[in-house]
Amino acid sequence: MPTPRQALKTTVEAEFTAWLPGFMRERFGLAVQPAPSKSDLRGFDLAFSLNEDGQPRLILVEVKSRWLRSFLPEIHAKFEAVREHHPSRIPVLAVPALSPRLRSELRDAGVNHVDLAGAAYVRERGLYIDVDPASIPDRRSQMRASHIATDTALETINPFSDAASVVLRLLLSDPGRAWRIQDIASAGTMNPGWVATIARAIESRGYATRSQRGSGRESDLQIADPVAALQDWTDVYTWRANHMTSYNVPFEYHELTQRIRAFIENISARGASVEFPVALTLHSGADLYAAHVQHEQLHAYVQANAFTELDERIRIDFHGKAADRGEGANLHLLQPYYRRSVFVGASMRNDLPVVSPVQLYLDLINYPVRGKEAADVLARTVLGPEWSLSSEQMRRLLA
């Protein structure tokens, strides 16, 4: 019986087998069909024959159900071996979804690639394809479609899912600490056995290392490559995954922050059941760490049990009006995609609650209005010093 990892790989291979010939025909007018003999695979997962001006060529496809940067050295070496020994053959990496940043990295490394969104890059003798889809698919559906198995096969575990990401958030919050599995479970209110499984998945990706002292729940776990972890995370997350309700409120930005502060003080005085019913993010959150971008927009995550009360306060006391599609709005409430983990590491700064630097970076990096610029400032002033990043690590993070 196939393992979940094997079943997932088989499913993705079948998708590309059915999809690739039509894509190549309709987009480029190329006649591509599955190669008839398994002997053509030569260590690859799929093989297709390409009839180019009467000259048959072989496309060798390496399939990955998801892409991790740790795969790159092996893939690069494999492709170079094909080019050296069989220059007429065309090696291609196939992954269901590749972010713009990953596609750029693969292109720079000379790795031909294709994904199911229609991105394609192939540069071989006599063949050059470079397609960047005009519209990127909705990342929310991509995240929700991520292959998260109930089995413990490491490659099928998504360390960036809501509950699982608590482990990474804790490790990144204190990079110098070697965490016992039991301590992580206690801090995150999680089952220790499940935390141990997530820990193995994180370790297998090179994000963290485990000590040799102890085993299972007694072993230590410490972040090893925070840059790789954060970059891989940004490739599968966007702030648009949150549900946003926008308002047009007749107050200046500093007045909005004062009113939000008063709301928090009021709800806290009544003995709120959660420490942070609200936490600022995007540029309004960046202001509290390293102000850099001038703006008049306030974005705040709101706990589910506080949303109705704050929504009513905005409409009555703030004189706010709902803004369809955010047009003309200056106040935005986000009901978080990460319902459980988004408030992990939140803190008070200047008497205002703000999400952790990690969550703030995740939200900013793909925000269209100077988000990358603000994320880079956050990386230089907060994440880099907190994680004691070297100049080479900072270069990787800012790339």
Image (spheres, rainbow, N blue to C red):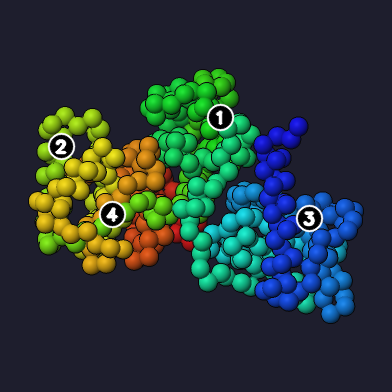
**Upstream in sequence: badge 2 or badge 4:** 4
Q: Quadrant of residue 204?
A: top right
Compare residues 236 and 398 and report the one nearer the observer.
Answer: 236
Q: Which amino acid type corresponds to the residue marked 4 in the rendered image?
A: Thr
User: Marks 2/1: CA distance?
Assistant: 38 Å
Q: Nearer the viewer, mark 2 or mark 4?
A: 4
Amino acid under disc 1:
Thr
| Relative side of 364 to 284, left or right | right
- How would you rate the neighbour count of disc 3 (Cα within 10 Å): few for under 14, some for 14-19, many for 20 or more? many
- Residue 89, given in percent of the width and then of the height, sits at 82, 66
Q: Are marks 2 and 1 in contact (CB under 8 Å)?
A: no
Identify the mark at residue 46; answer none if there is no mark: 3
Residue under the image location 71 percent in, 40 percent down: 6
Q: Which residue is mark 2?
A: 267
Real-space CA distance between mark 3 and mark 4, rounded to the nearest whole angstrom: 46 Å
Secondary structure at numbered mark 4: strand
Can residue 395 be spotted in the picture? Answer: no
Quick one: quadrant of the N terminus?
A: top right
Q: Earlier in the sequence, mark 1 or mark 3?
A: 3
- Residue beneath disc 4: 245
The circle on residue 197 is: 1
Q: CA distance from mark 2 to mark 4?
A: 20 Å
